[in-house]
Amino acid sequence: MSDNEGEQAGPKSTFTTYMSEGDQLFQKGEYVKAIECFSTALSLQPDDKSCLVARSRCYVKLGDAESALKDAETSLKDNKNYFKGLYQKAEALYTMGDFEFALVYYHRGHKLRPELQEFRLGIQKAQEAIENSVGTPSSVKLENKGDLSFFYNGVRPKDLNHSHKKESKKHGQKKSKYEKAAKQLLGELYSDREFLDKLLQDEDLIKGKIGTGERVQDLIVGCISYLDTRTAFWQQQKPIYARQRDRTLVQQRWSRVQHKPPSDPTRYVLASLEDIDKALSAGDAESGLKKARELMKAVKEWSEQALPNKREVLGNLHSCIGNALMDLGNMDKALHHHEKDLELAKKGDLMDSKSRALDNIGRVYARIGKFQQAIEVWEEKVPLACGGLEKAWLFHEIGRCYLELKRYGEARDYGSRSLTAADDITDEKWQLNASVLMAQAELKQGNYKASVLHFERALDRAKLLQDDSASEAIQKALREARHRVTQ
């Protein structure tokens, strides 16, 4: 801001600069300052959806749920299916304590982007919050925790409960081949599918409407239709393995150990690690940090005999603590824990753990602006990278660091490597990111025609992904690059 009283006309920098500064402040936990940056950016581009969502996230962190909800709804004004806006609206409603309505929007987002874990975790935490705040009478316990159980406000109508018992008996006698296949393919979602069927039997319920005006019947039928579509797809493709959640490296290594008693420390550790992972994935860094520290204290007291792979568990916990501290903006302590993870990985010759630690150390350095250190760490990780997705991300991040250091040739080269990896797995998101990186590097080097070609490819990908914010930003950059060509 200017110190001259006469110069109060407005912002002195670009939209992108304010957005970048706001993102950095958010990562540091300086939410009030981040809001100021995002607000200034919005004064330049008032309808930018990404910026509205970013400011909404800050308001949620500060507990100002009403402002968060307002920004989220504004981001959805022109596109009701903007998944980031849907998620942020759900988060704002959850923060306000409107768990039922939050659950509706988590569901809508999950229907649009089923591959995103955030929506599924949102559904789970909203369900738990509803059950905790309302409670379920002991006489009508819900064995199937359906995603729409909130419509009952904790009291299931007697006629539906009676119908539910009849249906359960009927299904217990004979299941069709389709139902058996659906149960296998849908996994944890099958109970939702059963529960939704039973909801449709309550005539009074399905005639009602929720707060947004949408008919309950339409919402239920839409959810059932979605699940049936997914069942058909999974039957054709048979990717049952894809329904299973990714397990930690520790779980993979211990899968050989069977028939463990419930009191076994190994089982306790695995369950605790999963709880920590859920907390961190849901954005609850403080809870994840607390649980990880408590588990680490217990693990340190156990012997190697009582707990196999103790060193690996400790490394995993250092990683969890480091990631939580990163989310909370404490970069120095985060770096310390990720370095501890790396030290344990090297001592135990654990290549997967080493790759993870190098990944996280590089992220810390990049966030605090130490781009050369980030490059050195990430380049050490390159030989350990597995799979096209990890390579596309890693090469892109190294290229971004080179771009920040004004080493545009290296930035372009790593952008090209990222694009090749993304092309190999046909990942449109990373094709977009890599193309933008290459376009920016070419533009900085004065290779305007090459820059135009890469921006055009990036624009095609953004339109394919229906990413309106990216499309707008790329179109502006593309106009500048084309202007340079004609000069």
Image (tube, helix red, strand yellow):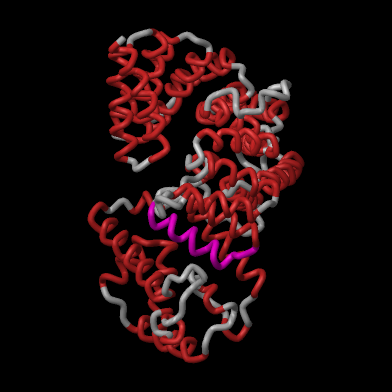
Quadrant the C terminus occupies: top left
Classified by dominant secondary structure, the portion drawn in magenta counts as helix
Q: Residue at x 39, y 84 (%)?
A: 201
Q: Is residue 279 above or below residue 2?
A: below
**Bounds of the magenta span?**
97-112
Q: Could you say which quadrant of the image residue 308 lies in?
A: top right
64 vs 406, nearest the viewer: 64
Instruction: Please tell me whether residue 109 belongs to the stretch shown in magenta.
Output: yes
Report the side of 32 relative to 126 (left or right).
Answer: right
Q: Is residue 245 above or below residue 17?
A: below
Report the side of 103 relative to 450 (left or right).
Answer: right
Report the side of 37 relative to 390 (left or right).
Answer: right
271 vs 424, nearest the viewer: 424
Q: Residue at x 57, y 53 (%)?
A: 70
Residue 114 at least partly seen: no
Question: What percent of the width, then of the height, locates residue 291?
Answer: 70, 47
Q: Is residue 339 above or below residue 71?
A: above
Residue 139 at least partly seen: yes
Q: Could you say which quadrant of the image residue 393 lies in?
A: top left
**Count of labels in the image:** 0
Quadrant the N terminus occupies: top right
